[in-house]
Amino acid sequence: MVVLAVLLMDARKRLAALERKVREAELADEGLMWRAAAIAEPPAEAPPARPSPWQAPEPEPQPQQPQPFPAAQAQEGARPAVEPLAEAAPVVTETDRGEAVAPPQPAPRWQAMRPSISFEDLFGRKLPIWAGGITLLVAAVLLVKYSIDAGLLSPPVRIVLGLLFGGGLIAGAELARRRAELVQDARISQSLAGAGLGSLYAATLAAANLYGLIGPGTAFAALAAITALAMGLALRFGAPSAVLGLVGGLATPAVIQAGEPNVPLLAGYIAVVVGGLTLLSRSQRWIWLGLGALIGGAGWSLLMILMGNLVSLSMLAVGLLVLLLGIGLPVLAAGERHSVALRIGAAVVAALQLALLVATGDFAPLSWGLYGLLSVAFIWLTGRTPALRQGMAVPLLAALALAGIWPDPDPALFRIVIAGIVLLYGGSALWRLWRTEGSLLEAGSIAAIAVAGYGVCHWQFYDGAPGQDGAFALLAGGFALLPALGAALGWNDARRHQDIRFALLASTAGLLVVIAALMGLPGWSLPVGIAIVSAVLLGIAVKAEDRWLPRGAQGFLAMAVAALFATGATDTELARLVATEPHAHPAQAVARWGMATLAAALLAWRHLGARAGVALQLVAVLLGYGLAAQILPAPWLAIASALTMLALAEVMRRQGGRLLVPALATAAGLAALWAMSPFMLWLHPALVSLYGEPMLASALPALRPMLQHLLVPALIAGVTVWRLRDGLPRPGWMLAMAQIGTLAAIGVHILYKQIFAIADMDAFVRLGLAERTLWQAALIGAGVLLWRALGQRPAALALIGAGLAHNLVYTLLLHDPLWSAQAVGPLPVANLLLPAFGIAFAAPVLAERIAPEQAARFRRPRDLLWMAVILLFAYASLRQLFSGTLLTGTAIGPAENIGWSVLAISIAIGFLLWGIRQGLRDWRIASLLLMLLAVGKVFLIDASGLEGLLRIASFLALGFSLIGIGWLYSRYLKPDGLKPDSAVSP
């Protein structure tokens, strides 16, 4: 600690001196920059300037000594060119003309700041105004409440005062608006107007519901008038009045207590209020006001429909209101920017409400006739106004939904309704489909009519079982003619390449064909039929040169895969993917999986190099694996997956590309999954062995499953990846080889464990060290062989590193013979200790020869490892002399104890000599530490238990050793610990 304190003080002094020099240099640089900025071009005749310490003096008869920096004074009365910087004070320099020049100062920080909202502006000007308006409204409510509680005023007087208060506030708002030059804030008038409207609403509601002074009709009219007043005030004062008008106008029918509501009158009132609000929204460009009004009106219309028991006049009124809210008013509520989205949303809501209205009318023929007339009118309007065509799907879907929820429909009327939907909507869509105005919307309508039309028929009348109903199979085929006709009409149309109309219609027809097959064919054949449809669509896409239709084919492939898991002998077929299971119908299974595999392979081949091709290759390989599982027993599927890898690799080598990498990776993944079982059986005892538990051969997987699932597939995969070494990226190839090499090494390790067949602890004590040493040597030897024969440096270094790591963990740490019962052999020196500990010496040396450029980075860890290994080997050898083959079998005697101390001193001297010879400081430090430990042991332990000559001999040996070490340090080392150039090696 004293030495460290002295060194610390010296370091502080050096650091302080360095800081002073750095500061002086910084000041010099700043002064030079400021002077360079201040010096201008001198005039022809300049007055003499005072000497500057920055320039060399003019030659004079008497030499002048240069001033060091910083100069105290160039001459008496002159200020230095650079003065100490005061905090926040600019430094002023002087030019040769004697002018004072200040250095450029950075811009103030506030100039670079972005403008922000002022705290005073927010909390002092804006919020108090709105808070004042709310406070006035609350004050009015509290005043009315106080008068009620105290009984000061009669109910009529209270109501009149409330109305007068509200009117006064509105008048104050108008006055504030007129005297804007005094008020200077529009929010004041808005706040007063809003508070006044709220007071009027509150007074009117109190008169009707609280005191019963006026009837429901009068209150209704009064609230409607206040709402109209709110709309007018909104034009004069702004949005707050509009908000009150929106809330008050829509809430008026709800807060008026009345008996049976008059539905036509209520519908008319809602239409007027919502219409007025939408007109106000359009004129003031308040889209939120119109949207809120439409939402409120839709809520009222829905409520009237849900009340039910609507007579013909009420139903007509509600229906007109729904049409007005869904078609008419959205045009007025917003400008062109938001018009499309608002119209579509309103049309959806209106269609749903109109469908609900028809449903509540018991699906009578008259209701359907009215709905048909409305559909004809809507179709005619879409021809006149193309923008409304986007809402065509709403009445169409509503009609289909009504047909679907129709309880116990009459078959004849149901046929008429479905035929009308197909003719009206389907016919109009076919007419426009490939014309100039045609678009994807018409194709979607045709597809929806075909699929949903069949679905509604199936839902209402089907009661059979799949594969047993030819009538519904024919019905599905009939509905398939509609999209097929649409696709056929566009076969020669060049515009079909620009969008997905053709693909959508063809795919829809294919879907209905699949449904027909489901209805009329046995269930097990469904994957076959879907796969055929997928292949046919792919063929049509190739023939028609359509770039969208292959996506439809991909969708049908997905359906075929799903059908594989839902039909047929699923339990048996899926069980064969992982285990051996007898087949009841092998031909059916092969047909199902084979057709799906063929379709997937065709799609994958068509999409080679495309993004979709990655997933298609994966699906094709998985389906091919399923096909192989229906033929081969399960234990051979891992080898089949590996052979698939090899076949794909050969195809890739011949094509010279990487397009089949996804398929190759999928086959590799299947083989890896099979390898997981033996791998996990090996991994558990391997992990437990890290805690010191021996890995016994009896705990490892059986040989045959290991060979079939792990070792043989790994070897085939290794050959595959080796064959692709020139076609794959180097990092990916190396990673794959590392993974495969790891699995192969695990399989070889399982085989190797069978040689010694260590099955219990007694065998582990006798053979454990020999087994580990031979395995470690084999790993290192395999690495050297790879380097010598194939020049594979990474793989060689990996194997050598694995052997060294195994030696460090298991031989030197967990099962070191010094503290673990391991038989080393009965003979001194000629035992297992030398090869067991020698591996830690040989592995680094071999690694340095393979990668000499990396040797310097690992020199220190290698030296530390060697020091530890020398100590362990020396003490294990000494222990073997006294205890025999088991180093833990006997206690340490006095002679052996002295031998430990002598051995430590000898090793310390050896470390010192080696460190001096090689100029390695780490070895010398280790020598000193070891010597200190030996000295401590001798003084504290050995000497206390010795007497007579042994004690004297120990001290003599220790003394001479210490003297010798001191002599060596003084003879061969400089005081700073560096070896002199002329040192003579001992």
Image (cartoon, helix red, strand yellow):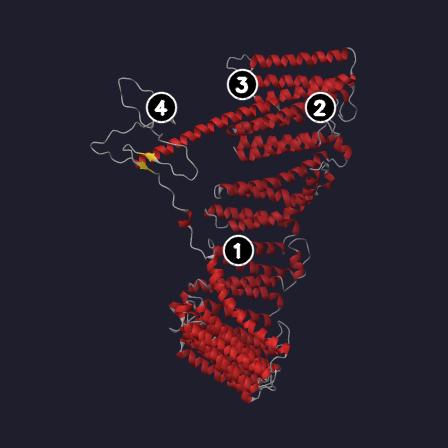
Residue wearing tag 4: 67
**Tag 4 or tag 3, which sits nearer the N-term?**
4
Label 3 vs label 4: CA separation?
Answer: 41 Å
Q: Which amino acid does label 3 sit on?
A: Leu
- Image height check: is 899 above or below 42? above
Residue wearing tag 2: 876
Contact between marks 3 and 2 (CB within 8 A): the answer is no
From where the camera sits, is residue 396 visible? no
Question: Percent x, y for residue 591?
Answer: 59, 61
Which of label 4 and label 2 is nearer to you?
4
Label 4 vs label 2: CA separation?
Answer: 73 Å
**Tag 1 or tag 2, which sits nearer the N-term?**
1
Badge number at residue 615: 1
Q: How crowded is mark 2: few (under 14 residues within 10 Å), some or many (20 or more)?
A: many
Label 1 vs label 4: CA separation?
Answer: 81 Å
**Tag 2 or tag 3, which sits nearer the N-term?**
2
**Tag 4 or tag 1, which sits nearer the N-term?**
4
